[in-house]
Image: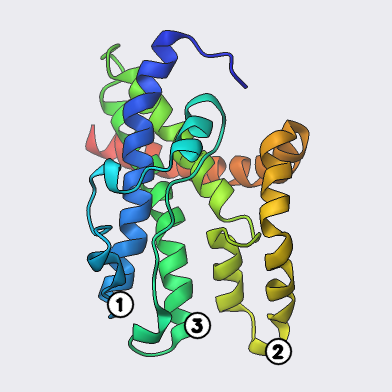
Amino acid sequence: MFDFSLTDLIARAPAILIALALHEYAHARVAVWLGDPTPRWEGRLTINPLAHLDILGTIMLVFGPFGWAKPVHVNPANFKGDRKRGMMLVSLAGPLMNVLLAILSVILLIGFWNQPELRPILQSLLMINVGLAAFNILPIPPLDGSKILYGLLPYRYSGWLYSLEQYGSLILLLIVFFPSLSRFLLMPIYDTLYAIILPVGSAIGKLIF
């Protein structure tokens, strides 16, 4: 988990700032778009990483395969239209931003492969964004995946997600401190996302470059 050289850490630093800041900005932007001013009031409608970073979550991402930022607070009561659908869209925005950033990373890797100073940063940007997307779509409260699943399920079938909330923090701690569990839960999602992102980004990159 901690087998990183100084060069690796330097390459990961800008990738982490970009991935975390834009993940949370996407949540904030969609919430405001749906009518909730809370993220704007709390200063989260910005791509400035300092507004979004969580110290522990950032450290975890520096040295490990996943991490987190400060959650964006939203008030679904302010949403225009269906609140359940609105919360699902806000939750989906973060992981979707990471997927788009990962695709962009592949495109840029194709275009700038012969630039040795950029390649490690772009490779880190790819891996970190895939990892963040995979981690956040786990259907474990309070991760985005639980809210996405809640938005997809009929009301009569979504009650069990509420019952998981009291155990969500414990489950996340187990994932953090037991690498075998995190690999078991995350690798199938990570591999699936990577198998989609790589060919899509490669196809676009070859068209552009």
Callout 3: 10 Å neighbours few (<14), some, many (20+)? some
Callout 1: 10 Å neighbours few (<14), some, many (20+)? many
User: Any mark on residue 156, and which?
Assistant: 2
Circle 1 SS class: loop
Circle 2 SS class: helix
Type of the residue with mark 1: Asp
Type of the residue with mark 2: Arg
In the rendered structure, which disc, 2 or 3, sits on the residue that comes first in sequence? Answer: 3
User: What is the spatial separation of the Cα atoms under label 1 and label 2, in whole angstroms?
Assistant: 26 Å
Circle 3 SS class: helix
Q: Is residue 2 shown to the viewer in this render?
A: yes
In the rendered structure, which disc, 1 or 3, sits on the residue that comes first in sequence? Answer: 1
Q: Which residue is mark 1?
A: 36
Type of the residue with mark 3: Lys
Q: Residue at x 42, y 9 (%)?
A: 6
Please tell me whether residue 108 is drawn above or below residue 172 in the rendered image: above
Q: Which residue is mark 3?
A: 84
In the rendered structure, which disc, 1 or 2, sits on the residue that comes first in sequence? Answer: 1
Q: Is residue 198 shown to the viewer in this render?
A: no
Which quadrant holds residue 156?
A: bottom right
User: What is the spatial separation of the Cα atoms under label 1 and label 3, in whole angstroms?
Assistant: 14 Å
Q: Position of residue 94 (x, y in %)?
A: 41, 56
